[in-house]
Image: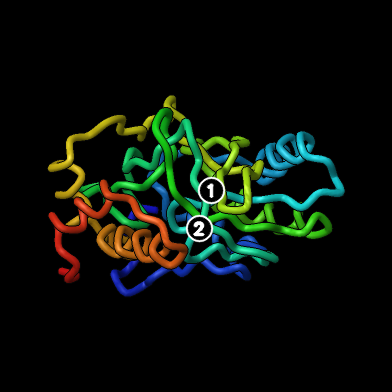
Amino acid sequence: MPDTAPPDSRIIITREALRDGSLLAEARRRMLPGTIFRTDAEIAADLAASLARQPPDQDVWLFGYGSLMWNPAIEFAERRGAVVRGWHRRFCLWLHAGRGSPDNPGLMLALDRGGSCAGVLFRIPAAKARAELLLAWRRELFTGAYRSHWVTALTDAGPVRAVTFVVNRAYDRYAGRLDEATVAAHLASATGSLGSCREYLAETLAALQSVGLRDRALERLQRIIGTTPD
């Protein structure tokens, strides 16, 4: 969302705004010209295809590794820390809106191939799965930045099959592997209608800590940029 609106017009991601479509409408209004959006029908079709791979009478687990961890904006029955192998968390998506601007782009987290990632699982009862997951799909899949993907998440109670969102490397704002100094510089200064990248980093680390997990790479970034907002 390019920050053409006044600086104080902060957008808050809420369950209500996802349900009534107002968040998507506002996001589409603020995005840069030329941005390609998925339609509501395309978002719903992607969700249906994902759920077709899950028995309809089973609860669904959703794996969060960024803002979903501290602001899921969905109803769930259980929250649990977990680790996913084969994917790692990385600041690899440029943001020209939301938490950045065209003049000072921010960076968003995504799951990229290789390594491992600690995060938070949310268990959604089978009867509510489609309605609740639609909110997450509207939030994460309204552009082509992410793809929905099933993973195995390891928890203290055993492995869990979960759905999550991984980066689309073909997306035009995929940043790939950036050096730490570049990432830190953007996180320290970029801000937009959703808030600052500095806040995003701090909230991510706090959410991991709340379930007894760590991400040492993110902790290094936080030490580099400091914790005091500009």
Q: Position of residue 34 (x, y in %)?
A: 42, 37
Query: Which residue is painted at 71% across and 37% down in the image?
Result: 50
Q: Position of residue 59 (x, y in %)?
A: 77, 52
Mark 1, residues whose alpha carbon is within 10 Å: few (<14), some, or many (≥20)? some
Query: Which residue is painted at 81% across and 49% down in the image?
Result: 58
Does dot 1 land on a helix, a strand or a loop? Answer: helix
In contact (CB < 8 Å): disc 1 and disc 2: yes
**Which of the two discs, 1 and 2, sits closer to the camera?**
2
Say above or below: 226 vs 45.
below
Is residue 189 among the parts visible in the rendering?
Answer: no
| Residue bearing mark 2 | 68
Q: Nearer the viewer, residue 151 or 229?
A: 151
Q: Locate residue 105 relative to residue 22 in the image: left or right.
A: left
Is residue 85 among the parts visible in the rendering?
Answer: yes
Query: Which residue is painted at 26% across and 46% down in the image?
Result: 217
Say above or below: 167 vs 223.
above
Earlier-in-chain disc, 1 versus 2: 2
| Residue bearing mark 1 | 140
Q: Nearer the viewer, residue 185 or 223?
A: 223
Which residue is situated farthest in the right direction here? 57
- Measured in 3D between alpha carbons, the distance from the residue under mark 1 to the one under mark 2, in whole angstroms, is 10 Å
Q: Which mark is residue 202?
A: none
Q: Position of residue 51 (x, y in %)?
A: 75, 41
Q: Nearer the viewer, residue 194 or 130?
A: 130
Q: Nearer the viewer, residue 10 or 65?
A: 65
Three-letter residue code for mark 2: Leu
Three-letter residue code for mark 1: Glu
Does dot 2 land on a helix, a strand or a loop? Answer: helix
Mark 2, residues whose alpha carbon is within 10 Å: few (<14), some, or many (≥20)? many
Query: Which residue is painted at 44% across and 25% down in the image?
Result: 170
Based on the displayed image, in which of its 4 quarters is residue 229 positioned?
bottom left
